Amino acid sequence: MPVQQQHQSAAIGQQIKMGIEAVGGVAATSAKQKPRSQSTCWFLQRRQLDNISIVLAEMIATAMLMFLGCMGCIENSVFTNSNFQSALNFGFVVLICIQCFGCVCGAHLNPAVTLASYVYNMISLPMALAYFVAQMVGAFIGYGLLKAVLPENAIYSTSTPNGVCLTLLNSTLTSWQGMSIEFLITCVLISICCGVWDPRNATKQDSVPVRFGLAIACLSLTAGQMTGASMNPARSFAPAIWNGVWANHWIYWVGPMAGALVTSLIYKHAFRREVEDSEVDEATMSTKRTSEAELA
């Protein structure tokens, strides 16, 4: 074979080899990218499922609040009750709801708390709106279940002629006094929330359900006989819509929502402080050393 033909054959062979390597490289690159694409799709799907789980948990928790909390407010010739019993019952119910669903959705149970968490940069605006819808639907379902399982004389009695668990203004108070009371007690509730959310309390979350339960019981004992101590538009909305009673209903929206907005803004800018990583590590080690000492 002539030398020139040998060189041409060698050149052609080299080109074919390079082409095969190029095709193989593209195929390898595609093979590497394919799992990444699947992983990305899985991640997006997982995040969507997590969001659905959060919203569903918030709805169930709010339904539980209304069903168990309002059941504890029944008072007629058969079931005796008092402000102390109702207040304590609502506190215990909040404790149960947070213990069950706090790890899933935070168990806000309350549009005012959700507004404060949004202002506090705990959740996004779309998630805050989703929480709001879940709370309103959950409250509606919870009170509806109460009416479905209880006899009519338990819902309507001489003590509760308009319906059990309605948040009504005491006849000795004006609307503005009632709104001020709701505003102030909601300020206290949101102060507790902001304190729990404060980064400096990140390692002190073990007794949060008990804290909130006792706080709700205390505030209900204080203002329950004056305004019903709602502090929660969803809690007031569900009984109102099921029974068609809207007297002074606006105070149970304006008072709690304004209190949540004002308090969260003040706490965020005046009292909140970010914690350095070294401080978090030191707090964690301190907690660990304390636990080890107790076990020893």
Image (cartoon, rainbow, N blue to C red):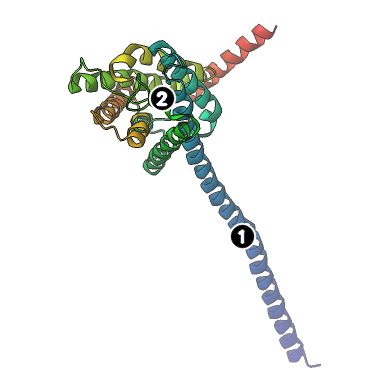
**Which residue corresponds to the image point at 50% horizontal and 16% vertical from the top-left?**
210
For residue 235, what is the image quadrant?
A: top left
* Of 114 and 66, the residue lying toward us: 66
Type of amino acid at the residue the image marks with label 1: Gln
Which residue is located at x 53 percent, y 41 percent?
53
Q: Residues within 10 Å of mark 1 (few under 14, many from 20)?
A: few
State if disc 1 and disc 2 touch (CB < 8 Å). Answer: no
Q: Secondary structure at mark 1?
A: helix
Q: What residue is shown at x 60% (from left), y 53% (from top)?
A: 39
**Label drawn at residue 147:** none
The residue to which callout 1 is attached is: 33
- Please identify the quarter of the rendering in which residue 206 is found: top right
Q: From what the image shows, is residue 230 above or below residue 291?
A: below
Q: Position of residue 285 (x, y in %)?
A: 59, 16
Distance from label 2 to label 1 (Cα)? Answer: 39 Å
Which secondary structure lies at badge 2?
loop
Instruction: Specify whether residue 272 is in view.
Output: no
Q: Position of residue 87 (x, y in %)?
A: 41, 15
Q: Which residue is mark 2?
A: 274
Q: Residue furthest bottom?
A: 2
Q: Earlier in the sequence, mark 2 or mark 1?
A: 1
Residue density around tag 2, few if under 14, some if 14–19, many if 20 or more, within 10 Å? few
Type of the residue with mark 2: Glu
Vertical relation: 136 (above or below) 83: below
Q: Is residue 101 visible?
A: yes
